[in-house]
Image (cartoon, helix red, strand yellow):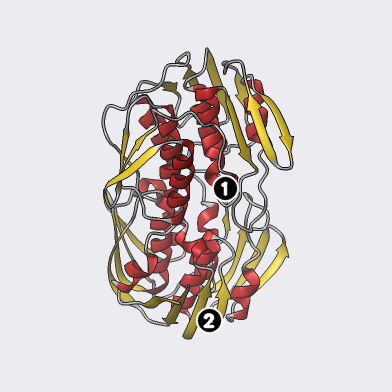
Amino acid sequence: MKFEIFGGKTFSGEIEVSGSKNNTLKILSASLLFKNPVVIENVPQIEDVFRMNELLKDLGVNIFYKNKNTLVLDSRKVKNFKLSFDTAKKLRASIALAGPLLGRFNQVVFPYPGGCVIGKRPIDIFLSAWKKMGANVSEKNDVFCLKAKKIKGTNIVFRLPSVTATESVIMTAVLGYGKTIIWNPAREPEVLALIDFLNASGAKIFGAGTSKIEIIGRNGKLLESKKPFKIIPDRIEAGSFLILGSALANYLKIKNCNPEHLMSVIGVLKDAGVQVKIGKNFLEVQKPKKLLACNIKTSEYPGFPTDLQAPFVVLMTQAYGQSMIFETIYDGRLNYIEDINRMGAKIIMCDPHRIIINGPTKLRGREIESPDLRAGLAFVLAGLIARGKSLIYNIYQIDRGYEKIEEKLQKLGLNIKRVE
């Protein structure tokens, strides 16, 4: 499958944001910590969620949909603590299951987690934390076996904040013995949403959003779900639509979002001359008469998100002046730049983490292949801006995180379709 795009068209309309991919994957993982069924609402229909559900079913979780976006998960009969290797190797987020399994069974077996081509990301931060919590770790042929007599409270200090590592330690410690303290944890909204979900179900977690999180273990006692949990809006999808509107919209209303999660992005766009109106759960945006170049440096929340770096680069190809982009989170996340240059951009690669964009330039349609989720969406944006026809291949990468993206864009009148 591929996307066929005919670009160069402005638009007006409204678009709705789906539930957060990253929040959903961690809530699904946390369902392993419960003694009763868990109901999750606003679940996005995306490939990463489908793969996570496959892993959970293989473990023995009973999963069914009440409706299109509401899932029920029952893990009462789960006895398996080994992840399916074939599926886990394809999904970076599969490592989020290791913490709950270790916390529940005191053991877990999993392969090195898969992911996209932006690099085989290290998991030493996870392994180090689990060792401190009492687990013995062995590894052979990229398969990890962890086993503990019991999960014990400890102090864990992160050199750099990590979202998934923070969430994994929390989910491991919830059923453990004693107090676990995480110093320098991640503060992303998805972390806070997971903590809210766990605390509403009997967990005792303190310090969400601060530099220190404390978890009081439940001594092996499983959690109990009291009410359905609603997944928070996907701030990366909302930010992607905000950037799309900044490039092409005469008027765009972005519904079902939390503007507070995007203040760093909104601030940068306003500096670039974009008009953004902020509502309680919506944003309104329109492209400026003259888009101005801006520098950004990606960083942990509440800084500019690395997941919006690629779409923002495409936007800056249309800005007047010179922009400098500094990617500080992931190695290899600028590998898509040459494809944008082939479309007519003038981007200079300074080093693996910094680029300079000279604009504005006229983009032209091309055939390109999505290397990863976020660059894939950036290619869609580039195709919509460019004159002529673009073909975007490997759109599975885009489907991993964006729910029926072409249908949402078609409703705005944009010329994009999914073809064989």
Q: What quarter of the picture does the C terminus occupy?
A: bottom left
Measure how far apart labels 1 and 2 are at the Cα level.
Answer: 33 Å
Horizontal side of 226 relative to 379 (left or right) equals left
Residue occupying the far bottom of the picture: 388
* Residue 26 x %, y %: 45, 39
Tag 2's secondary structure? loop
**Labels 1 and 2 touching (C-beta < 8 A):** no
Is any part of residue 312 visible from this angle?
no
Asked where in the image residue 200 lies, by quadrant, the reply is top left
Identify which amino acid the numbered label 2 is placed on: Leu
User: On the rendered structure, is 6 left or right of 138?
Assistant: left
Count of numbered labels shown in the rendering: 2
Label 2 packing within 10 angstroms: few (<14), some (14-19), many (20+): many
Viewer-proximal residue among 416 and 246: 416
In the picture, measured across the screen, residue 234 lies left or right of residue 313, that is: left
Q: Amino acid at mark 1?
A: Arg
x 41%, y 29%: residue: 77
Q: Nearer the viewer, residue 62 or 349?
A: 62
Q: Relative to 42, does residue 127 appear above or below in the rendering? A: above
Residue located beneath label 1 in the image: 92
Q: Residue at x 69, y 28 (%)?
A: 137
Query: In the image, residue 129 lies at what x, y percent?
Result: 63, 27
Q: Position of residue 370 (x, y in %)?
A: 56, 68
Mark seen at residue 363: 2
Residue 135 lies in quadrant: top right
In this rendered view, identify the residue nearer to me: 253 or 203: 203
Residue 230 pos. (x, y %): 30, 41
Residues 401 and 61: in front is 61
Mark 1 vs mark 2, foreground winner is 1
The first of marks 1 and 2 along the sequence is 1
Answer few, some or many: residues within 10 Å of disc 1's Cα (few below 14, many 20 plus, some between 14 and 19): some
